[in-house]
Image (cartoon, rainbow, N blue to C red):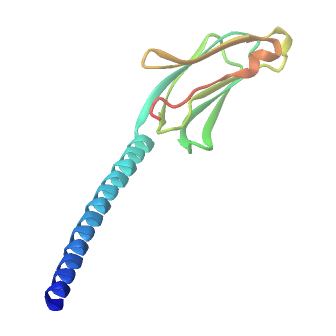
Amino acid sequence: MRRSLRTCAVAFTAAGLIFGLSACSEAEKAKEKVEKEAVDQVDKAVNEEYEVTYEVTGSGVDSIQYTVSGGSAMEPKMETVEKPALPWTKTVKLRGITPPSVLPVALDATGAKVSCKIVHKGKTLKEETGEGLAAAGGCVAVSPIG
């Protein structure tokens, strides 16, 4: 009788281990699949390019700084145009989660009246208007990819 109880106990323990390991294996596979999908999503977002058009209108603008392709999302590459003729527009390609931004600079803010806009696929992502010191606020939008 003790022998059959011991045999049953060993059999139940072995079955429990098999089912337990099987469940852990399935859970591990599911976790790996979710992690791979997340990495694929980030890779796609980081490498995908998108196009935006910057628009600046108004008066009293001495220069315009704007984000262009290159650099990183945390330190995007910027270019500057001096003494721009207004209205001014520029279409650029950006990559991934890099935020588009355009910053009109007015050295004599007393006469400045500025509007800026960032457009992606016909949709305005960000628009700002200001006078005087508020004119130099600029526009910064969130990447449409993120």
Q: Quadrant of residue 31?
A: bottom left
Q: Which residue is drawn at 73% across and 21% down?
A: 137
Residue 38 position within the rendered picture, expressed as x and y whole percent measured from the top left? 38, 48
Left or right for 129, reference 110: left
Residue that lies at the very extreme toward the bottom in this rendered image: 3
Residue 51 position within the rendered picture, expressed as x and y whole percent measured from the top left? 45, 27
Q: Quadrant of residue 107?
A: top right
Q: Which residue is drawn at 14% across and 89% down?
A: 1
- Front residue (pair 95, 126): 126
Q: Using the rendered image of the protein, determine whether residue 43 is visible from the camera's viewpoint.
A: yes
Q: Using the rendered image of the protein, determine whether residue 82 is visible from the camera's viewpoint.
A: no
Residue 54 position within the rendered picture, expressed as x and y whole percent measured from the top left? 56, 20
136 to 13, vertically: above or below? above
Q: Which residue is drawn at 85% across and 16% down?
A: 108
100 to 47, vertically: above or below? above
- Front residue (pair 124, 104): 124
Left or right for 67, reference 50: right
Residue 120 position within the rendered picture, expressed as x and y whole percent measured from the top left? 47, 21
- Front residue (pair 127, 6): 6
